[in-house]
Image (cartoon, coloured by chain):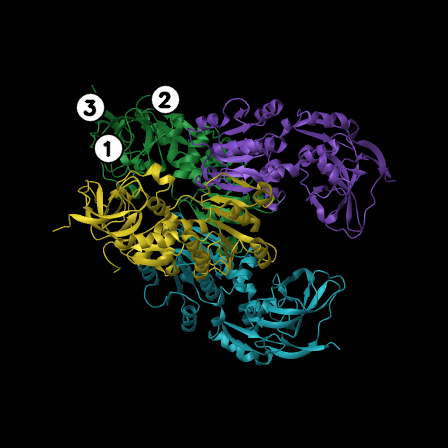
Chain colours: A yellow, B purple, C green, D cyan
Amino acid sequence: MPATTMKALRKVRPERGAQLESVPVPSIGPNEVLVRVRAASICGTDLHIYGWDRWSQSRIKPPLTFGHEFCGVVERVGEEVSAVAPGEFVSQNLRIIGIDQDGCFAEFVRIPATNIWKIDPAIPEHYAAILDPLGNAVHAVLAGPVAGQTVLVTGCGPIGLMAIAVAKACGSSSVFATEVNDWRREMAKKMGADVVLNPAEGDAVARIKKDTAGTGVDVLLEMSGNQGAIAQGFRALRAGGRASLLGIPSNPVSLDLVGDVIFKGATVRGIYGRRMFETWVQMTSLLKAGRLNLDPLFGERTSLEKFDEAFSLLQGGHAGKVLFYPNGKPR
Amino acid sequence: MPATTMKALRKVRPERGAQLESVPVPSIGPNEVLVRVRAASICGTDLHIYGWDRWSQSRIKPPLTFGHEFCGVVERVGEEVSAVAPGEFVSQNLRIIGIDQDGCFAEFVRIPATNIWKIDPAIPEHYAAILDPLGNAVHAVLAGPVAGQTVLVTGCGPIGLMAIAVAKACGSSSVFATEVNDWRREMAKKMGADVVLNPAEGDAVARIKKDTAGTGVDVLLEMSGNQGAIAQGFRALRAGGRASLLGIPSNPVSLDLVGDVIFKGATVRGIYGRRMFETWVQMTSLLKAGRLNLDPLFGERTSLEKFDEAFSLLQGGHAGKVLFYPNGKPR
Amino acid sequence: MPATTMKALRKVRPERGAQLESVPVPSIGPNEVLVRVRAASICGTDLHIYGWDRWSQSRIKPPLTFGHEFCGVVERVGEEVSAVAPGEFVSQNLRIIGIDQDGCFAEFVRIPATNIWKIDPAIPEHYAAILDPLGNAVHAVLAGPVAGQTVLVTGCGPIGLMAIAVAKACGSSSVFATEVNDWRREMAKKMGADVVLNPAEGDAVARIKKDTAGTGVDVLLEMSGNQGAIAQGFRALRAGGRASLLGIPSNPVSLDLVGDVIFKGATVRGIYGRRMFETWVQMTSLLKAGRLNLDPLFGERTSLEKFDEAFSLLQGGHAGKVLFYPNGKPR
Amino acid sequence: MPATTMKALRKVRPERGAQLESVPVPSIGPNEVLVRVRAASICGTDLHIYGWDRWSQSRIKPPLTFGHEFCGVVERVGEEVSAVAPGEFVSQNLRIIGIDQDGCFAEFVRIPATNIWKIDPAIPEHYAAILDPLGNAVHAVLAGPVAGQTVLVTGCGPIGLMAIAVAKACGSSSVFATEVNDWRREMAKKMGADVVLNPAEGDAVARIKKDTAGTGVDVLLEMSGNQGAIAQGFRALRAGGRASLLGIPSNPVSLDLVGDVIFKGATVRGIYGRRMFETWVQMTSLLKAGRLNLDPLFGERTSLEKFDEAFSLLQGGHAGKVLFYPNGKPR
């Protein structure tokens, strides 16, 4: 007999924190799919919701099960669903849960059939749970040539860390990374960065220029959204170089368009689309072939019950990605 | 017997204005070339020098013959020069004259052999004199796809006006142009712009959005360097669009990186190189094939003697390009 | 009261020719759309079916209404269709009719809703009827740079003729065309080709080399599928040039890979996809902006009744495109 | 006192074989450079000359010192040479020696100053000696996207083997290789190929299709010049895939243009340029960063005296690259 109730991590009151509750397993409509969550990853958005900041207060209507990065196995499909069947390994192809409707920090999650994305079963669960942010990193890195190129990653949050690994796997010669947080700089090293700099200590741009024979880097991957880091990144970019911008600044940014873009003849790409088909194929291919080692990124693999420790770990900046396994540890 | 003196338009004193003087024809070294100037065009830089603004005061050391956009015929070559011969139709491949050494507002000009660029004799003189700024326009337009694309040109100075003609010749579907000066808006129409707007009157962005079914333009060609125009241009650009930036802002520019670049997934190209080989070939090919009609651009074709009227005309914003013919009117 | 019978041009017996018959108006299923045909164009495939050649004999099962290039107005939609409504101007997005199911040489045609493609009503009917082959031409031309480039079109059937117009509209400097049929060479001139050559008379490659200063053309658009023309085209292509291959050879083709591709460092693109979204947008945009004049292409605009003359005209090579107007001449 | 005679490996008579002779050190003109050869590599062309095949008989005029792949240190420069100085680590930027003038299988070699190419001293000598063929491999691989792509290398001679290493270093997911020679298949494995097939045994195309879920490979790198291998390679290429052709067929090749190029919408690139600036920078950058391990390729590092064994080894197909060290083993 199928389960009728399940554990779910929920924001139940308009305040900081969350609660693990027992709720009914979602019932699905004719065009929906019920997925048994295998692994779910905590994203920056989830930290905002947990911490109940201004954005969350204006956007989230409790009670809500949150979480949107996950992978799972199809448990049941609605009567009109033919494109996917029970037992298939899946995720979602757009961020549609965890904000306006119940999310994936639960044993089961309900997804419209048109948003189901099948995942190659050869991809391990802990990687399958983070395909959404990894797609961002892959897209940012491969938005232009990277083989034999020098790369600077400004900002080593989870996507910046993944971008380091992707750039190295795709043949970049030297990867520089800047980051103020000590733990993240340590992680950047583990992910394969050749030179990791603290922009608060010493002149990072001067060091990068020196290491590139005065030229500057071929590629800038801006992952911080920080005005100072953006300015440093552009100063470190060589004439004719390429910048991929992914970090989201919270205010308008003042750029030296003349010196940093026009006179440099630079190409600047805004990176927003995440799971475009091409990115997905490249990413899946890199993962299946074992070309990407993202293991250092995963700080903790835990159960839903230990959610408070998990959020604390991330808020303290002491973990890359933390995974929940609502139905028990990996296959 | 060769001429020993010639007319030259010179800045002789550190003050506004210029003087037409008789000076010795330049003598050339073993690796230099003497060119008889056929047509010379007044550029914005020349206006600065004539007007003796702050930049000129800090950069120009009188006495100096100014002018750097020209075409001419080789008169004499130094003894070690073999790549070019008397009678060939030429210009220069880099801005090397008119600032630090004597320029082309004269009957003859001296150019190092390595900077001589041969011009196809099939190209008319008045076009050959402006290949330098035209190269900027061609490079800006062709830095990405333009056929079947909607284009916005912000700023209708000479390069903006040329860009309009180039975009139309290369298959752009609709070309929008914004410009505050009445005369230049009139010119934009003549160069082929489909919709010409005065950004000081009415909401130019709203109009462009309306005419593009709410989408915005595919391509932005920023030619003004004006903060307001840059902001408007980016707002009018569609998601996934392409911006070529060529206008030089005089101050750092504040951009809405999130809304205008990142969330739009836009590609922004700084346009600086001018006479790269590829651009040159495309431009020459378009000109030879008669695909570019730039005739409306030429306001006055005059002699060096009438330099005061020429500069007044341009400063009043009542001409696109004014040409001097130091050795008499065109072939 | 809606019509219950309609005229339809049908292959009723396994032999050369066709018959105009009165047949029931198609009834539509819940996911289908009934379209009132405005204009329908005769394609090469239709000539094969009419002539009952070997391919037709093996593929077509009479009785069948043939024809697949058309535009029309939605008459009725099935009960589950919501994406399109009566009165909309449409065509189909894949070749699905006229071979295995009844086609568009009739007053009405039945199309699955998922294959309906809406057309901008600003596009005239005679152009809307040929968007399918025009998409091929646009895709072939724009598969690489064309502005300021010299182009050779080998084979001036309808798609080759359209390609000439598209290349000129998109800024190609000189367009060369080769074709053995006199009438088609005449048409190539009308569509804008600069130099039109009969490969059976004189050395076409030598002439093209001479006109391009010995270099050869930048772009080859191969539209003939003819072994000799393919060989000529590649010989006329410059080092570093680009070839788009669209003509379908009936046998394996022997290429001088070393001299024509490898040592030339050429790029060769097979052109097959036709209505990819990007091509569609470019084409629609060029048409709406009036940048493409395809009018010379249209030889005859007639009624279904005059089908025998229409097919004769095309078979004799004396027309580009012939259109049927099953519901009366254009709006 | 500088040496006046030197050892040189020479073709002295029009017959198979070579002779090590003592000849005068070349004297240099005012625009030439004398290079002390550090390492020289035997290329396929050298094998032809040694074996005295038909091509050699028609092209080579004994006596001649042969060899053209090398690196060395500038010994002396002509009086007008200023761009390079004694002590610099160099090679040549075009194949200009070893055919029409004396080559590098000697202690010293004379090179025009305009053909001198400086090499970063951080690159080891055995790699610096093969930058010419490595440039071919890098160019072929990076002529399109390769990160996250499946790749097939047909033909595992030295350039094919290098291409395997380059593709893996630049993020290709799976590299397939086909080769009939046992030793070369063994080497392909060592260079990093994931699946190595003998096309003479079993159906290589079927195996590749199976391993790519029926799709075929994203990228074909054709290095064999063999008609059968070319045909197999194209059959194994996926729709929309990219082929780089570098192997030189000795006869015109019959291609199934329809099935292999047109209907596949494939892109085919002829690869000929070798040391274009961009390729050079990418290659140097990969080498300096240690991203390319080519060590398995080097079968023997020997002295000029042992030339007979060296050529035998290569002719038997039992070595990738054999290096001579005319001035003693590496630094």
Name the kind of residue labelled 2 in the image: Pro
Neighbourhood count class around disc 2 (C-alpha, 10 Å): few under 14, some 14–19, many 20 upward = few
* Residue D221 visible within the image: no
Neighbourhood count class around disc 3 (C-alpha, 10 Å): few under 14, some 14–19, many 20 upward = few
Earlier in the chain: of badge 1 and badge 3, it is 3
In the image, B239: left or right of A33?
right
Q: Which residue is disc 1 drawn over? A: C32
Instruction: Mark 1 vs mark 2: tell me if same chain.
Output: yes
Q: Which residue is disc 3 drawn over? A: C4
**What's the distance in space between the residues labelled 1 and 2, CA to CA?**
26 Å
Q: Position of residue A86 (x, y in %)?
A: 20, 51
In the image, D44: left or right of A93?
right
Q: Position of residue D177 (x, y in %)?
A: 40, 64
Q: Considering only vertical position in the picture, is C174 above or below D126?
A: above
**What's the distance in space between the residues labelled 3 and 2, CA to CA?**
23 Å
In what element is the residue under mark 1? Answer: strand
Q: Which residue is disc 2 drawn over? A: C330
Name the kind of residue labelled 1 in the image: Glu
Q: Do residues under tags 1 and 3 come within 8 Å of each other at their CB atoms?
A: no
Q: Considering only vertical position in the picture, is A71 above or below B190?
A: below
Q: Position of residue C41 (x, y in %)?
A: 35, 31
**What's the distance in space between the residues labelled 1 and 3, CA to CA?**
17 Å
Chain ID at mark 2: C
Q: Quadrant of the N terminus of chain C?
A: top left
Dividing the picture into quadrants, the one containing residue C46 is top left
**B31 or A230: nearer the eye?**
A230
Earlier in the chain: of badge 1 and badge 2, it is 1
**A75 or B73: nearer the eye?**
A75
**D189 or D220: nearer the eye?**
D189
Earlier in the chain: of badge 3 and badge 2, it is 3
Name the kind of residue labelled 3 in the image: Thr
In the image, which is nearer the foreground, mark 1 or mark 3? 1
